[in-house]
Image (spheres, coloured by chain):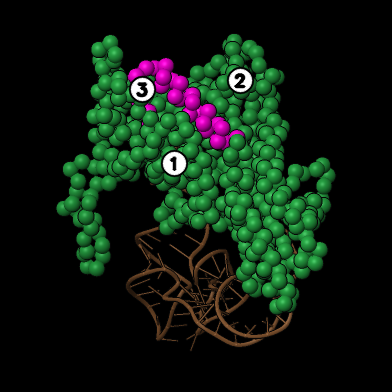
Chain colours: A green, B brown
Amino acid sequence: MTPRATNYPQWYLDVIKRGDLAENSPVRGCMVIKPHGYAIWEKMQRELDDRFKATGHVNAYFPLFIPLSFLTKEEQHAAGFAKECAVVTHHRLKSVNGEVVVDPESKLDEPLVIRPTSETIIWAQYKNWIQSYRDLPILINQWANVVRWELRTRLFLRTTEFLWQEGHTAHATEAEAVEETARMLDVYADFAENVAAVPVIKGRKTPGERFAGALDTLCIEGLMQDGKALQMGTSHYLGQNFAKSSDVTFLSKEGKREYVYATSWGVSTRLVGALIMTHSDDNGLVLPPKLAPIHVVVIPIFKTDAEKALVLEEATKVAAELKSQGLAVKLDDRDGIMPGAKYYEWEAKGVPLRIEVGPKDLEKGSLCLVRRFVLEKEGETEQELRKRRKTFVPRMEAIASIKPTLDTMQRELFERARVFRTKRSRVINTMEEFESYFAKDGGGFAWVHWAGNHEQEDEMAKRFETTIRCIPFPDQIPEEAKGEGKCILTGQPSTQRVIMARAY
RNA sequence: CGGGACGUAGCGCAGUUUGGUAGCGCGCUUGGUUCGGGACCAAGAGGUCGCGGGUUCAAAUCCCGCCGUCCCGACCA
């Protein structure tokens, strides 16, 4: 596996390959999510879905195809996606000289756009569902695939087709919709930090980075190990834009006809990429226990047939006892594979804990516990680190320690990522410092004062490949970055700092 | 769509300059010996050399055309 320090993008691809998460498909830009990768997504879905339900949402499903005319209704929205839409124009194939071709006779009267997001088709239905304030709010989420015809793709981070969830809500008042937008951002932040163990900054996008058709876009931003930012979730306050373009009105308590207020919010399989780039190391995938499809792998070790029988019996018992604690356990009893090979394989797949059961453990009534990672110490060698991951523990104690150990690992991953982010964040006041931060020091989150406009944002992007990731919420700003100042580019007075970074 | 590279076994590649009957590593199958950090030995299976045409006694190799993929520039969850 390519080390991170040698070639970060290649390392990322190696982690995915060795972790058996996904691979490229015959269709350019699309990916096949393999069982282990999909299992991680399923864990994410479960965690998120529970949170959506807990905040009063229900799931529904809207179609993949959107009539072309729907997309032209909301002008800004349409313009935002126009350049990346796949369009279905025919509905039949035929065989010509043994070759299958599109039947030109089957041309559709109206082309169908494959959803890049579902606002338009959902609001066309909401129009029929909403007449009175009594019909509000509508709090619907859908789990779906969407297609955005990207030119440059990367597994999980940006693929032509991706899986996501999109929430679409309708409210009687602006205040309620604004509140919903913030609530769902909090749900995402809670998931990111407490489940995925990825620390995030909550903030607001600048008008230039805003979702097409939104009045306000909120986001959570994470910092990856290469110093690049990753947008991990967005929540949009759509105002009455979609209600107006789809003509969705309701009669208020006072008998007044009013346009509905809307929100939409989403996270995607990109989160798997965030997970990889936040926690993984040069041995492969590292997973927070809460998202690990397998918590513990049990590996039997033996020489003779007699030993094999005894060791397997014990290994099976250990696995069963852990399963009864509600843990996901894999007993790797494959023949003909060296134990060492199994270690590498399960480490590359990110399994948090390994239990080795051998003849010596039977003798001593112990188990060998190996953690996928331990927090690094200053100046430690690879050998020392590996040794520290491994402990021999009396059997009963070992079984009882698994759950607490997983909890510890979950906390440590978050803490490690937070320390990394702090180290790679800097409060910056001058262009000189800004330039050297990104040119020499690898970059990260740059906290800078900003009072520029859209064009000036582009100028920064051209010069440094950096963008404003977000305008952080006041409670997200560290002490040293608080206060007023002057815009780093224009020198104009500025009331607060923004986060600039290179981004995925 | 412009600039660059490549297409040979499931994967990674050599062979192409100088035409001569298809090769290596990994993986896979079988048997044996192994097994506390990536095993070894032996025997096997596996190919329209991207596609089409041409030159030639003979083409993976030379010529022409096409197709496809990857990397770099204009988009973005």
* Near-viewer residue (A495 or A464): A495
Q: Report the side of A280 relative to A205 (left or right).
A: right
Give the position of the C terminus of chain A as an image quadrant.
Answer: top right
Residue named by callout 1: A164
Residue A396: give x, y in percent of width and height: 74, 55
Q: Is residue B36 above or below residue A188?
A: below
Residue named by callout 2: A475
The secondary element bearing badge 1 is classed as strand
Residue A471: give x, y in percent of width and height: 55, 22
Between the residue at mark 3 and the residue at mark 1, the CA separation in whole angstroms equals 23 Å
Instruction: Please report, as a chain letter, where disc 1 is located.
Output: A
* Near-viewer residue (B35 or A25): B35
Residue A177 belongs to magenta span = yes
Q: Are marks 3 and 1 on the same chain?
A: yes
Nearer the camera: disc 2 or disc 3: 3
Residue found at x 31% / y 33%: A122
Instruction: Please report, as a chain letter, where disc 3 is located.
Output: A
Residue A227, image quadrant: top right
Q: Is residue B41 above or below residue A253?
A: below
Q: Can residue A480 be seen?
A: yes
Between the residue at mark 2 and the residue at mark 1, the CA separation in whole angstroms equals 28 Å
Residue named by callout 3: A171
Residue A475: give x, y in percent of width and height: 61, 20
